[in-house]
Image (spheres, coloured by chain):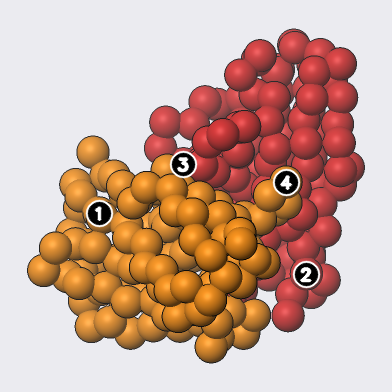
Chain colours: A orange, B red
Amino acid sequence: EVQLVQSGAEVKKPGESLKISCKGSGYSFTSYWIGWVRQMPGKGLEWMGIIYPGDSDTRYSPSFQGQVTISADKSISTAYLQWSSLKASDTAMYYCARVLFKNWFDPWGQGTLVTVSS
Amino acid sequence: EIVLTQSPATLSLSPGERATLSCRASQSVSSYLAWYQQKPGQAPRLLIYDASNRATGIPARFSGSGSGTDFTLTISSLEPEDFAVYYCQQRSNWPRYTFGQGTKLEIK
């Protein structure tokens, strides 16, 4: 079974750094792009960026370029999303998903809730 | 950037009825369109890709149609578990992906 398992919920203060993870299993992790998607409270889905774990080629949405860093460690089949200085506006649910045929997101991880509050 | 506009924002129907959800693109996306279902507290799930292909394990009551700028997701006969939020998503200009704002399908 193809599965993506994300790290647990985080509560952070503004200005702190954070790195959340997404571990893939049940398929060749290095052969598919992994995408990250943000969902702010009560809102819709926003694509943030994608990474190809095979060679760490990374592409960002213009809206998130410079705001986050996406990386991967293929030796442990894990992708990461990180912030160097969190803001309250980063409070959201973050999902990772495998990118099928470079087009579609399937399956999705269970999500990681990030709360940033002083 | 290609904008996807979904309508209606909310659709109120009863179990057994037919649901028709619309997604319109600001410019042609060919057939590079997918539909997702999201239930409260859950991650989205891929339903339809390439505008009309059902994803693995998706019941036959779900169907997608359209190409270019106008797309439709149809649920032929609503089951209680179908009440959720539905999103369309395009990737006509890789790697640029955008989602519609969602349609909430609620029980009447």
Task: Tell me, yes or no, whether the two marked residues, 3 and 2, touch with CB atoms within 8 Å.
Answer: no
| Mark 4 or 3, closer to the camera | 4
Q: CA distance from mark 4 to mark 3?
A: 26 Å
Residue sitting at the far front: A118
Q: Position of residue A11 (x, y in %)?
A: 49, 54
Foreground mark, 3 or 2? 2
CA gap between label 1 and label 3 equals 20 Å
Q: Are marks 1 and 3 in contact (CB under 8 Å)?
A: no
Q: What type is the residue that disc 4 sits on?
A: Gly
Q: Residues within 10 Å of mark 3 (few under 14, many from 20)?
A: some
Q: How many marks?
A: 4
Where residue A42 is drawn, which disc sits there? 4
* Label 1, label 4: how far apart the Cα atoms are: 27 Å
Image height of B74 relative to B3, above or below? above
Residue under numbered circle 3: B55
Which amino acid, by three-letter code, is at mark 1? Gly
| Residue B72, position as x, y percentages in the image | 75, 45
Instruction: Return the mark for residue B3.
Output: 2
Q: Chain of mark 3?
A: B
- The reply to whether label 1 and label 3 mark residues of one chain is no
Q: In the rendering, at what x and y percent does residue A21 appear? A: 32, 60
Nearer to us in this view, A63 or A40: A40
Lower position in the chain sequence, tag 3 or tag 2: 2
User: Which quarter of the rendering shows the C terminus of chain A?
Assistant: bottom right
Q: Amino acid at mark 3?
A: Ala
Q: If the image is split into quadrants, where does the N terminus of chain A sit?
A: top left
Residue B31's place in the image compared with A2, above or below, is below
The amino acid at mark 2 is Val
In the displayed structure, does residue A2 sit left or right of residue B52? left
Check disc 1 and report the residue beneath it: A24
